[in-house]
Amino acid sequence: MEDEDMPRLVAGGRIKALFSEEGELICLELDGKRYEGVGDSAPIPLSQLKNLKLGEIPEDVFIEPVKSIEGNVVYGLELGELFSYTTRFSRNLAEVEVFSWTAEWDDVVGPRAYLRALTSIVKELEKAGLVESHYVEKEEKWFTLTFLLKVPEGLTVPRAVKLIKKIAQEVEAEVEYRATRLALKELRKRMRMMGKPEETFSTRFKKIYADVNG
């Protein structure tokens, strides 16, 4: 009987992957070259994945295409402009993590509207069967939204990355549109609640002095 507490080796074709007792990926070997695991996936420079098809990735193994790796520093791919993306590919699935550091948000439309817009889009895609599942994590200074997407296993990794980039661009355009509408709707509601002052601000300001002197 196999000991479930022992490290597990998964191998198939050009790939070998070693998992820890806790299920984390220790390392992955592609064409004889070793890459260190991070969590449940292995970051690998996209340049090393040119001819690898998703269908060649063994079950339960996830690969994260990145721009480059220098020492212990991993430089991610730039897939969008509004958000940062981390994409992990398995045999026929993409796990896309959308991240935003809201502490330095400087857009006239706030991050809350953007997150609401992004969530509504992904829920819509999930309802249509285009996205498998999603979940959101948020703190005071950041938020992430992660979703699973079916990807044809006949695609090479670079082509799969291009697919995700096109999706990211379309999603971001729709997010900007919906977030702006949400913000305008909220502002109109607030303006109606505030009402329009009968006097100008200058007149009201002068009355403050008049009341003090009066």
Image: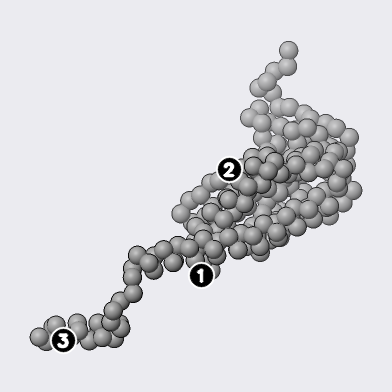
Q: Is residue 190 left or right of residue 11?
A: left
Residue 210 got which mark? 3
| Whether residue 39 is visible | no
Above or below: residue 134 compared with residue 188:
above
| Whether residue 91 is visible | yes
Closest to the observer, 45 or 95: 95
Element type where label 1 sits in the image = loop
Amino acid found under the numbered disc labelled 3: Ala
In the rendered image, the quadrant that contains the C terminus is bottom left
Name the N-terminal-most of marks 3 and 1: 1
Q: Position of residue 201 (x, y in %)?
A: 30, 82
Circles 3, 2 touching at the beta carbon (< 8 Å) = no
Question: Which residue corresponds to the image point at 61% horizontal and 46% vertical from the top-left?
Answer: 123
Question: Which residue corresponds to the image point at 63% horizontal and 30% vertical from the top-left?
Answer: 22
Element type where label 2 sits in the image = strand
Circle 2 residue: 135
Distance, label 3 to label 2, CA atoms, is: 57 Å
Distance, label 3 to label 1, CA atoms, is: 37 Å
Q: Is residue 29 left or right of residue 125?
A: right
Circle 1 residue: 108
Q: Is residue 137 left or right of residue 46?
A: left
Closest to the observer, 85 or 134: 134
